[in-house]
Image (cartoon, rainbow, N blue to C red):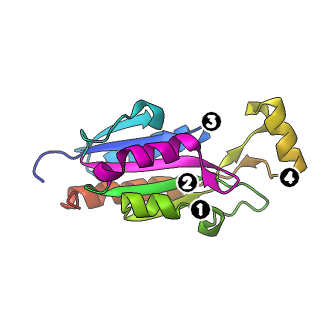
Amino acid sequence: MTAAPRVLVAYSSRHEATAEIARCLADAVRSGSGDTAVVDVRDVVDVPDVAGWDAVVLGSAVYAGRWTREARDAVERCAVELGRRPVWLFSSGPVGDPPRPDADLVDVDEELALTKAREHRVFTGLLDRDRLSAVERLVTRLFRAGTGDGRDWPAIRAWGTAIGVELTAGATTR
């Protein structure tokens, strides 16, 4: 592809932590492309289709081992188009002590199959009880969920940069 690649970084985030990861990834993709990629960041609910982009980075917060309903709906809605372009998936969560991103803790088998994603990364997330509703705070206490910000910004930036490099190396074809 000779034109600058158009990249969508789409996310589903209930409390902004995954949105913050998406924005960091977008900056890193742009940087990795030598600032040639045109990168848009959008909430998945604002993405009716992906026809206007050459590549997609798609991620979701993880609750009880699954992506949010909005993210899963976006994958189903755009599955055919996603299968025709390079796609990378990321998950935000879980948190714990010590925080350990573990792909086995996130069930994205269907999303991987539908999108034909090149890669799926799990990043440790953020659990800040001050951002939660009363019900969510109760659930986190009942399940003794770890709290804190375990996001590894250097790892997030490195992955986004690698995607940008790959895209500018002519990898925008399926």
- Decide which of tag 1 and tag 2 comes sooner along the chain: 2
- Decide which of tag 4 and tag 1 comes sooner along the chain: 1
- Distance Cα–Cα, label 2 vs label 4: 20 Å
Q: Which mark is residue 14?
A: 3
Which element is circle 3 on? loop
Which element is circle 2 on? strand
Q: What's under tag 4, amino acid-wise?
A: Phe
- Distance Cα–Cα, label 2 vs label 3: 13 Å
Q: Looking at the rendering, in which quadrant would you find the C terminus?
A: bottom left
- Distance Cα–Cα, label 4 vs label 3: 19 Å
Circle count: 4
- Distance Cα–Cα, label 1 vs label 2: 10 Å
User: In which quadrant of the rendered view does residue 102 lie?
Assistant: bottom right
Q: Which mark is residue 107?
A: 1
User: In which quadrant of the rendered view does residue 172 lie?
Assistant: bottom left
- Distance Cα–Cα, label 3 vs label 1: 18 Å
Residue at image point 24% right, 38% down? 52
Q: Mark 2 points at which residue?
A: 91
Q: What's under tag 1, amino acid-wise?
A: Asp
Q: Are marks 4 and 3 in contact (CB under 8 Å)?
A: no
Q: What are the residue bounds of the magenta stretch?
A: 54-82
Q: Looking at the rendering, in which quadrant would you find the N terminus?
A: bottom left
- Distance Cα–Cα, label 4 vs label 1: 19 Å
Q: Mark 4 points at which residue?
A: 143
- Depth check, mark 1 against mark 2: the one in front is 1
* Left or right position of 97 against 153: right
User: In which quadrant of the rendered view does residue 169 lie?
Assistant: bottom left
Question: 12 or 123: nearer the eye?
Answer: 12
Residue 169 in view (yes/no): yes
